[in-house]
Image: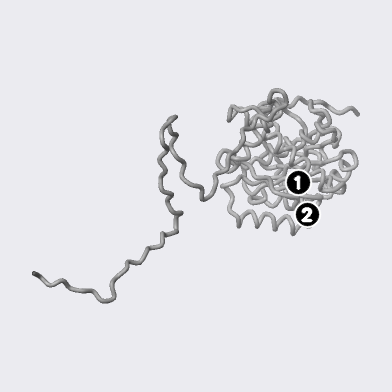
Amino acid sequence: MSMKKIELQLDEQASSNYFVREAFNSLRANVLFSGKHVKVIVITSCYAHEGKTSVSFDLCRNLAESGKKILLVDADLRKSVVVSRYTKERGVYGLSQILSGQVDANEAIYQTNVEGMDVVFAGPYPPNPTELVGSPAFKEFLNEEREKYDYVIIDAPPLGLVIDAAVMSSLCDGAILVINIGHVKYRVAQGVKSQIEKSGCKVLGVVLNQVDRKRSLKKDNTYYSAYVSGKGGEYSAELKTGARPASAAPNGASAQRPVTRPVVNSAQPTRPVAQGATPVRRPVQPAQGQQRPVRPQQTSANPTTKKPE
């Protein structure tokens, strides 16, 4: 049975941002270096609106563009936004219908306009989402798709609000926690991390979202902006100082000026003297910290007092 194809609305502006692109390249590299046994990865957060769905989608897209075969599973059976955000299609099948036995998995897996990336939407909201993701049907579904794809990325509900992500984690090889910096307390993040580890799943890492680059990474941005604009190394120094690099000097000569070092404890310079005039020598002042010896005054041993006349 041929797979249905669906058109996804891609945010080209965000993908063209240099720093966003490099961040997802780094995330992709970390996932690839996690090991060949890590194939099913669940992505969750502490609270809603922390960007876990965007991170899941862009990670799948980045992996697919690198030549991997990826399946994105929208497992947020409570409040999914994937359909409304990324496609105009309506009435698509989803995960809830697969797990409840209404449709076959091949009917609910859609091929996208991103080459190498397929997607399973959440489907209609069921009354028992926790029971569905913890059922043997979900485990069987993941085991089947594990053999077909290089990576299966699961977009799960926030673990700080519902327990669904912890139930899914027990069936996954690794987990990624998305945290909106400045909105989640340390104690809450540690609790979510501990909950994932209790399920037997390894936490692969944490993605910090909504980081203020201008405030915390100002120097790094200035450094990397040279790579974006192509004005790095000696050429950037040339633009700032107006001096050419040594290799650009004419006739192979060095463009750097000789540096004159000050002479320590040298005498004070004298003024230039006109021709024919007698130079006037100034006394040399003693160096700082040195004092001239004081000549003692001579006194008479038997002074005489002159009597008044």
Q: Is residue 189 above or below residue 250?
A: below
The amino acid marked with disc number 2 is Cys
Marks 2 and 1, how far apart in space? 10 Å
- Could you tell me if residue 87 is visible in this image? no
Q: Work out whether residue 72 or residue 205 is closer to the camera in this orientation and state it.
A: 205
In the picture, the disc for residue 42 is: 1
119 vs 230, nearest the viewer: 230
| Snapshot quadrant of residue 25 | top right
**Nearest to the observer: residue 230 or residue 9:** 230
Quarter of the rendering occupied by the C terminus = bottom left
Q: Position of residue 120 (x, y in %)?
A: 78, 36
Q: How is the image coloured?
A: one colour
Question: Marks 1 and 2: in contact by CB < 8 Å?
Answer: yes
Does the rendering let one see residue 73? yes
The residue type indicated by label 1 comes to: Val
Check disc 1 and report its element: helix, strand or loop: strand
| Residue at the spot of label 2 | 201
* Residue at the spot 73% in from the left edge and 42% down from the top edge: 155
Which numbered disc, 2 or 1, marks the residue that appears first in the sequence?
A: 1
Name the spot of residue 198 as percent of width and height, x first: 74, 59
Eyeballing the image, is 290 above or below 151? below
Q: Residue at x 60, y 55 (%)?
A: 186
